[in-house]
Image (spheres, grey):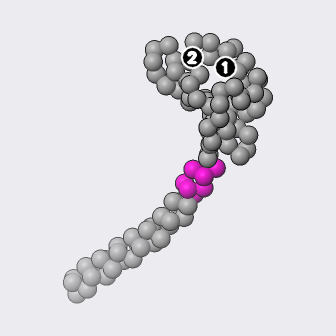
Amino acid sequence: MRSRSYVYATALAIGSLATVSANTPIFHDGIMEFVIAQDFTEIKLTELPTAITDAVIKDYPDVTLNRAFINGEQKYKLEVTQEDGTSLELYSDANGNWIEM
């Protein structure tokens, strides 16, 4: 009688694991959609809207602007270097408003 209980408990445990692993691809697809939405293309620094360069000068006066990128939603990603040498990524809309990505 005891071995039947162990067999039943083992089958129940294995069955519950299958349910958890079935949800994994859905979670993975959600991550992939997030990555695709952030697809940025590099642009020349001279192509940045004036509002963004003005915002950098005003809010981050001690950084060096290294690279700029744009995505399909007209959001900009800026790669800058701070005075201490650390890198920082800033995100902005076309009007120079800082956004979180």
Decide whether residue 79 is among the magenta residues.
no
* Residue drawn at 62 percent across, 45 percent down: 38
Q: Quadrant of the C terminus?
A: top right
The answer to the question of whether label 1 and label 2 lie on touching residues, with beta carbons closer than 8 A, is yes
Query: Dot 2: few (<14), some (14–19), or many (≥20) neighbours within 10 Å?
Result: some
Instruction: Tell me the SS state at disc 1.
Output: helix
Mark-to-mark CA distance, 1 and 2: 8 Å
Q: Give how far across and how far down residue 46 sits, in percent.
A: 69, 25
Q: Is residue 1 left or right of residue 41?
A: left
Q: In this view, does 31 lie above or below 41?
A: below
Mark on residue 56? 1
**Type of residue at label 1?**
Val
Foreground residue, 97 or 26? 97
Read off the magenta span. Answer: 30-37
* Residue drawn at 62 percent across, 42 percent down: 40
Q: Is residue 72 above or below residue 77?
A: below
Q: Give how far across and how far down residue 20 sits, in percent.
A: 45, 67
Residue 35 in view: yes
Q: Is residue 100 left or right of residue 28?
A: right
Q: Is residue 8 left or right of residue 63?
A: left
Q: Tag count in the figure?
A: 2
- For residue 60, what is the image quadrant? top right
* Residue drawn at 54 percent across, 64 percent down: 26
Mark on residue 63? 2
Q: Which of marks 1 and 2 is nearer the N terminus?
A: 1
Mark on residue 23? none
* Residue drawn at 76 percent across, 23 percent down: 51
Q: Is the magenta stretch mostly helix, strand or loop?
A: helix
**Type of residue at label 2?**
Val
